[in-house]
């Protein structure tokens, strides 16, 4: 269980969220993983008996607060990655989905071009909140 003085205390407080053992444990997992994780992966790494509904609610709350961001994987499930809550905006990097192993990765060193949405010439009837770029292919491990 996470202890007092977690590096995530200020982040939770800034987002108006209470500090709970499950929230701290999920943040620890996502920060350490370096790649997006699905709920089954998160559940398997948490203490036995952790309620799956609590995990889903926590991840939805984190996503709404921009503490984490979510990416739709090849199997249509959501994967969650540690976000940048200080910015409180949509993430601006693309994601990569391996068509062989299904691994989802944040490509944090790449950036979605700021002119992407205008370049698509989308009808003004639509309001685009943010673009999400997902690239499909084969990861280095599967090559």
Image (tube, rainbow, N blue to C red):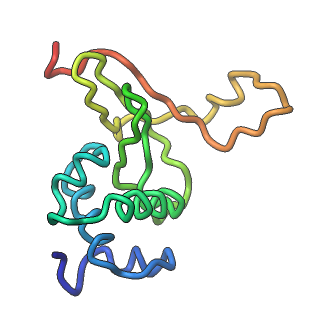
Q: Is residue 29 above or below residue 126?
A: below
Q: Nearer the viewer, residue 103 or 77?
A: 77
Residue 53 rendering spot, x and y as whole percentages: 38, 60
Point 14% across, 22% down: residue:
141
Residue furthest to the top: 143
Q: Could you tell me which quadrant the N terminus lies in?
A: bottom left
Residue 114 rendering spot, x and y as whole percentages: 60, 36
Q: Quadrant of residue 127?
A: top right
Q: Is residue 130 above or below residue 85?
A: above
Q: Nearer the viewer, residue 123 or 2?
A: 2
Q: Is residue 61 above or below residue 133?
A: below
Q: Is residue 29 left or right of residue 8?
A: left
Q: Nearer the viewer, residue 16 or 52?
A: 52
Q: Is residue 51 left or right of residue 129?
A: left
Point 51% across, 33% down: residue:
112
Q: Quadrant of residue 143?
A: top left
């Amino acid at each position: 269980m996470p202890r007092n003085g977690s590096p995530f205390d200020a982040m939770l407080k800034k987002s108006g969220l209470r500090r709970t053992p499950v929230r701290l444990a999920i943040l620890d997992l996502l920060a350490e993983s370096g790649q997006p994780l699905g709920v089954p992966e998160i559940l398997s790494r948490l203490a036995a008996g952790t309620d799956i509904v609590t995990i889903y609610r926590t991840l939805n709350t984190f996503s709404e607060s921009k503490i984490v961001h979510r990416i739709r994987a090849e199997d249509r499930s959501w994967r969650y990655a540690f976000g940048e809550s200080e910015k409180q905006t949509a993430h601006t990097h693309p994601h990569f989905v391996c068509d062989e192993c299904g691994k989802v990765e944040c490509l944090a060193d790449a950036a979605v071009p700021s002119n992407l949405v205008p370049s698509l010439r989308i009808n003004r009837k639509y309001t685009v909140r943010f673009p999400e770029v997902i690239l499909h292919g084969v990861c280095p491990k599967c090559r």
